[in-house]
Image (cartoon, rainbow, N blue to C red):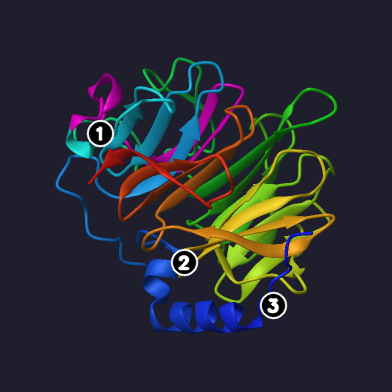
Amino acid sequence: MPRISDTRPHRFLALATVALASSAAISGCATTSGTVGAAPAQSASDVGHIHGLGVDPDTGIVFLASHGGMFELPSIDADAPIPMTDLAGPIAGRAQDTMGFTMIEGRMFGSGHPGPDEAATRPANLGLLTSTDSAKSWDSLSLSGEVDFHDIAVARTAAGEFELYGYSATTGHVMISRDSGSSWASGATLAIRDLTIDPGAGGIVYGTTEGGLMESADGGATFSPMAGAPALYLVESLQDGTGGLIGVDVSGTVWVRTTTDGWRETGSTTGLVEAMTYSSAASGNLVVADDRGISTSEDLGATWRVLATR
C-alpha cells in the first residue's frame, strides 16, 4: 500500500510561499479583477510564458498556449529533446495571446487577447474560442469582447454536450456553460488559478486558490476548502471516473489523490510549473512546463523525460 503523506507541512510551506509571492502563484498575467501577477521570465525563444498545455490523443502532438501564440511539439514519444527555439510555431503565424486553454477529444477551447498584428481588428478580450484544426484557425463561440478566461476546464455531459467552466479575469468569478459554450451562467466569485472537472460526477469542480484547493459540489455555484488537501498550484483530473486528482504545489511536489489512498506524494518537478496537463489517452502522460522546458512522466512524476529544453 503506498504511503499516505501528511500534507500539513507541505500545505504550510506552499501557503507561505504563495503569501510571499502571490503575484506568481495566482496568475501569470495582470487581470482586471485585482488578481495581478507577474509572469515568470520569458525564455530565449519566441514561446515566452506558457499558459496551457494539451495533447492530441491521436497524434501525440503536444500543444503549447503562450503569450507568443500556439506552438507544437512533434510528438510526446520523441526520442530526444529539442530546443524550445526549434518548436514549430506560432501556428498559422498568429501571435494570439491564448490565456485560457484546454483540449478534449482533439478539440481546442481557448481565450485571451489578439496578437499585435490583429489588435486593430479584433476585440481586446476574445471570449471563448474553439479550434478543430490544431490551432490553424479559431472560431468565436461566445462572449467576444466581454470576457478573458484565464483558465478553462471541459468535460462531456451525458447528453453529449461539452460542459465548460471558465475563470473570468474580467469579472473575477467562475462562469459555467452546459451547452458547449453557447450560453453562460455566473458562478462563485473566487480568485482561481486552475480549474478541473470530475468527469465521473456531474457538477463536481475543483479550483486552486491562495487559500488552498477548493471543491464545488454544485456546479461552480459555491466552493469550499477541500479537507486534507495539499495547497496545490495546478490540478487536473485523472480522467478515470473515480474522482482521482493529480496536482503540483509551488515547491514542485507532485500529489495524487485516489479513492483508495487519499493524497500522496508521487514525485517532483524542477522549479515552479507554468502549465500542466494530464492525458489518460496518451499512456497516462503527465506533461509540464517548468524550468527544464517541457517534460513528460508516465509514472505520476516519479521519473521524467524532457521533450523540449529551454
- Closer to the camera in the image, 194 or 83: 83
Which of label 2 and label 3 is nearer to you? Answer: 3
Q: Quadrant of residue 161?
A: top right
Report the span colored magenta.
86-112
Residue 4 vs residue 7, the one in the foreground? 4
Image spot of residue 134 (x, y percent)? 43, 19
Which residue is at 69% across, 52% downward? 245
For disc 2, the marked residue is: 26
Instruction: Report the side of 3 relative to 92 (left or right).
Output: right
Q: Is residue 304 left or right of residue 153?
A: left
| Residue labelled with disc 1 | 95
Mark 1–mark 3 distance (CA, rounded to whole Å): 44 Å
Is label 1 in a helix, a strand or a loop?
Answer: loop
Mark 1 vs mark 3, foreground winner is: 3
Label 1: few (<14), some or many (≥20) within 10 Å? many
Label 1 and label 2: CA atoms lie apart by 24 Å
Q: Quadrant of the N terminus?
A: bottom right
Which residue is labeled 3 in the image?
6
Of marks 2 and 3, which one's residue comes earlier in the chain? 3
Task: Provide residue 194's location: percent of width, then percent of height.
Answer: 56, 55
Q: Position of residue 292 (x, y in %)?
A: 30, 51
Counting residues from the N terminus, which is met first, the one under dot 1 or under dot 2?
Answer: 2
